[in-house]
Image (spheres, grey):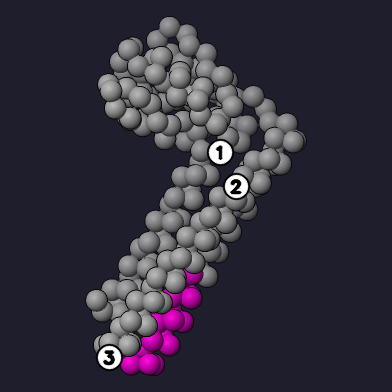
Amino acid sequence: MALDDVLLEGEDKMMKAIEFVKTEFGGVRTGKASPDLVNNLTVVAYDTHMKLKEVAAVTIPDARMVMIQPWDMGTVDAIRKAIEESKLGISPVVDGKVIRLPIPALSEERRQDLVKTIRKMAEEGRVAIRGIRRTALDEAKKLQKDGDITEDDLKSAEKEVQKLTDQYNGEIDKLLTAKEAELMKV
């Protein structure tokens, strides 16, 4: 593996870590309705595990309501059960062919708990990025040890990997700041 491949692979994995953090943040409820709250819930339907977005349409009729319309009415109970078992803390209201999720306003205490939760998620993202950095540096050192690259190339690669690490950690910080602001907005 060439040094450029090591750097590109490291950057690709860091981008995936950022996308994962974005997805995790999307699943945290902020007091206003969003399809991201439920899209990735796992529903047991047709004897298999499926994402909610694969078995139903999710719409937002107003700022405090999520409406789920299953494509097959046989999945209504499975969807209701998945929502109840999730950590959303929202009770679904089954209304015939539609499941409604009324989003209650968040209390100050609940907002603080959610901020702690997203900070933990952000730290997990930073840990993942540091792990990717370590792997990329180990691979670069192996290339240098095998004689494929010079010591100067190794130093340059270390600087580049650190620059990428700082860049992606900065992106996580931006996402965290935005999500905190969204949570604390009344």
Mark 2, residue position: 118
| Amino acid type indicated by mark 2 | Ile
Q: Which residue is mark 1?
A: 28
In terms of sequence position, does the residue under pointer 1 or pointer 2 come before the other? 1
Task: Give amino acid for label 1.
Answer: Val
Q: CA distance from mark 3 to mark 2?
A: 44 Å
Number of residues whose C-alpha sits closer than 10 Å to that of mark 2, classed few (under 14), some (14–19) or many (20 or more)? many
Name the residue nearer the viewer: 56 or 32.
56
In contact (CB < 8 Å): disc 1 and disc 2: yes
Front in this rendered view, residue 110 or 45: 45
At x 66%, y 46%, the residue is 116
Q: What is the span of residues highlighted in magenta in the rendered image? A: 149-165
Q: Of the residues shown, which amino acid type is indicated by label 3?
A: Gly
For the residue pair 186 and 144, the one nearer the viewer reads as 144
130 sits left or right of 49 in the view: right
Locate residue 170, reporting x and y percent: 55, 64
Front tag of 3 and 2 = 3
